[in-house]
Image: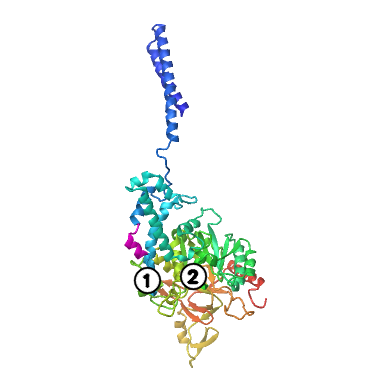
């Protein structure tokens, strides 16, 4: 800067001298001396002026205006620290409001869900303001790790300018800060008490979930499984690697009695796999974490920010990493899959009793609201950004934790109102007011050996032409044959597998694993014969397909169209079955 100013000054002075000499041409020598002397004086003065200016700038840059530094603001609109504190002061409940917030909820059934939903929405508002105050470098606007500001109490006491701006005293401001912290901490313990063994607060837990975009731990696969599902995992995980999936894998389990040390050793021998005991991360005093209920805890407590949860009996025909690139997932951060359109049942009144008003458009578009089916979601695969949907996941954990079971003495639990965990995910989102989720728009169906179904009639004495119905030929009068040939042919496949198709109508993944019969006796398990698949045909509220439920978890789907597996898809199925045979997943190996 100094050099630039000096050069500029010299240039200006030189120009002035040039014009001065030109103006005095023809005059005596003393005029030239006067001009040169003037130039020298101006040069010296310019050098002194530049020197003083540089010193002044250096002093200004090295000396802060205040003996304090304000943390980097955290919101997109760049709120200042004082503005964050103003919001804390505004939101701090008074004594009566605090008492109401911290009073235990004693209701049951639908009313209990509704009351906890309202209380959680209040908690969400308080928590978000607390995060804004403490988290530096907000990860929604900067691609770097956020930092928790742990020095705020000292800051409030040592920076009197803050309290002066807020028209209070440092001690009064600190009291407000600590009162807010106390209320928030006690409300967290009331609503979500199970995370305390591992994380000191939700602020710290959610902060731990943030990873930079290219971090190896940002994305991963999560399974929850027990020892009896070991053959499935020893088949599925190598198959995923063969499909090109390189994501790290965490297998969550519920103590040694759930997944034995020997089983864990077998799993951790696979590349990129670790096992983690959820029991060490959860306090389940007064209730027991078990079975299906462990699924949302496995997602929430994994070390990944973005999770693809996969049931132990789910099988992919493509690399599951493609789900992270799904447009609906990128938009919402939560991608769920639909269940079969089966067992019509309207739950509109029930939904209205549990959900705070207004009811969202997503709820009104659900099969539970329309009555098309009492089943909306199948939870065999979940794709979730846990940082983005932290509170919704916590509420789902509550539905599968302390509020899961009734007691037979008038207390109704969530599982008394719903079948297992599967509907608790999208409903948990809705209950806390989080409508950023989507259901995958691919069709669902089943796979196996196809049966061809046609129209049948009783034998007539007139001349007839045989028509097939399954494996039985029934003659039909020729005069009826032309009419019957115009009726669409139907196809039925019966299997325990629930197939999910991608947007182009090709198989993506299926639940129910590979067995013909999941309940076959040990030693007699055999893989199904996967020759073709059929799928539901939804449109205009009408479904041209139909489901029937049979024993042993077998469902039959009848549809007007049947599709064959492509050669590549058959190779994948053969590869998965081959791995299963090698690890002893089937009887007679």
Q: Position of residue 504 (x, y in %)?
A: 50, 65
Q: Position of residue 101 (x, y in %)?
A: 36, 64
Give the mark nearer the N terminus: 2 vs 1: 2
**Residue 439 seen:** no
State the SS at label 1. Answer: helix
State the SS at label 2. Answer: loop
What colouring style does the render use? rainbow
**Residue 81 seen:** yes
Q: Position of residue 144 (x, y in %)?
A: 49, 50
Front position among marks 2 and 1: 2
Task: Return the residue nearer the eye: 465 or 528.
Answer: 528
Q: Residue furthest front?
A: 171
Q: What residue is rendered at 52% in x and 82% in y?
A: 551
Query: Dot 2 corresponds to which residue?
Result: 285
Quarter of the C terminus within the rendering? bottom right
Vertical placement of residue 139 versus 36, above or below: below
Q: Which residues are magenta?
A: 92-101
- Classify residue 229 as left or right of residue 44: right
Task: Return the residue nearer the eye: 559 or 297.
Answer: 297
Label 1 Cα neighbours within 10 Å, binned few <14 / some 14-19 / many ≥20: many
Task: Return the residue nearer the eye: 411 or 523.
Answer: 411
Q: Quadrant of residue 158?
A: top left
User: Mark 2 and 1 residues: CB-CB less than 8 Å, in contact?
Assistant: no
Q: What residue is rendered at 50% in x and 57% in y?
A: 208
Task: Return the residue nearer the eye: 16 or 121.
Answer: 121
Q: Quadrant of residue 12?
A: top left
Query: Dot 1 corresponds to which residue?
Result: 354
Instruction: For marks 2 and 1, give the CA distance.
Output: 26 Å
Which disc number belongs to residue 487? none
């Amino acid at each position: 800067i100094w050099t630039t100013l000096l050069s500029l000054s010299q240039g200006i002075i030189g120009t002035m001298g040039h014009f001065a000499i030109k103006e005095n041409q023809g005059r005596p020598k003393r005029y030239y001396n006067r001009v040169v002397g003037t130039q020298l004086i101006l040069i010296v003065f310019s050098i002194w002026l530049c020197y003083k200016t540089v010193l002044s700038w250096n002093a200004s840059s090295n000396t802060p205006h205040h003996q304090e530094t304000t943390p980097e603001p955290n919101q997109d609109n760049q709120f200042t620290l004082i503005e964050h504190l103003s919001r804390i002061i505004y939101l701090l409940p008074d004594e009566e409001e605090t008492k109401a917030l911290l009073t235990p909820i004693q209701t049951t059934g639908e009313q209990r869900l509704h009351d906890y939903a309202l209380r959680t929405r209040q908690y969400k508002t308080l928590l978000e303001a607390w995060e804004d105050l403490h988290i530096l470098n907000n990860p929604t606007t900067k691609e770097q790790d956020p930092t928790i500001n742990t020095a705020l109490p000292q800051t409030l006491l040592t920076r009197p300018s803050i309290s002066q701006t807020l028209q209070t005293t440092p001690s009064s401001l600190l009291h407000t800060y600590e009162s807010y912290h106390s209320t928030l901490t006690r409300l967290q313990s009331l609503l979500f008490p199970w995370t305390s063994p591992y994380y000191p607060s939700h602020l710290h837990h959610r902060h731990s979930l943030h990873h930079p975009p290219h971090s190896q731990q940002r994305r991963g696969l999560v399974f929850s499984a027990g020892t009896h599902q070991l053959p499935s995992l020893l088949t599925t995980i190598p198959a995923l690697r063969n499909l090109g999936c390189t994501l790290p894998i965490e297998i969550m389990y519920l103590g040694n009695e759930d997944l034995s040390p020997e089983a864990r050793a077998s799993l951790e021998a696979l590349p990129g796999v670790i096992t983690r005991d959820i029991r060490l991360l959860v306090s389940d005093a007064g209730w027991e974490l078990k079975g299906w209920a462990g699924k949302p805890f496995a997602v929430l407590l994994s070390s990944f920010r973005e999770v693809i949860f996969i049931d132990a009996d789910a099988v992919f025909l493509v690399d599951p990493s493609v789900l992270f690139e799904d447009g609906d997932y990128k938009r919402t951060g939560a991608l769920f899959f639909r269940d079969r359109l089966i067992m019509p049942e309207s739950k509109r009144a029930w939904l209205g009793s549990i959900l705070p008003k207004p009811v969202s458009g997503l709820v009104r578009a659900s099969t539970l609201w329309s009555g098309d089916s009492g089943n909306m979601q199948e939870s065999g695969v979940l794709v979730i950004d846990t940082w983005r949907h932290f509170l919704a996941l916590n509420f789902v954990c509550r539905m599968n934790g302390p509020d899961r079971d009734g007691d037979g003495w008038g207390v109704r639990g969530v599982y008394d109102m719903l079948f297992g965990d599967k509907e608790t995910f999208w409903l948990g989102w809705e209950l806390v007011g989080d409508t950023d989720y989507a259901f995958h728009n691919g069709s669902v169906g089943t796979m196996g050996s196809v049966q061809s179904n046609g129209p049948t009639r009783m034998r007539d004495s007139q001349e007839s032409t045989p028509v097939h119905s399954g494996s039985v030929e029934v003659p039909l009068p020729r005069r009826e044959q032309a009419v019957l040939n115009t009726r669409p042919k139907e196809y039925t496949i019966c299997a325990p597998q629930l197939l999910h198709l991608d947007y182009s109508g090709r198989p993506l993944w299926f639940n129910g694993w590979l067995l013909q019969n999941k309940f076959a006796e040990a030693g007699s398990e055999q893989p199904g014969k996967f020759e073709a698949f059929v799928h539901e045909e939804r449109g205009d509220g009408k479904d041209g397909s139909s489901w029937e439920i049979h024993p042993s978890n077998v469902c039959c789907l009848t549809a007007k169209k049947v599709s064959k597996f492509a050669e590549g898809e058959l190779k994948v199925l053969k590869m998965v079955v081959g791995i299963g045979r090698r690890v002893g997943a089937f009887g007679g190996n």
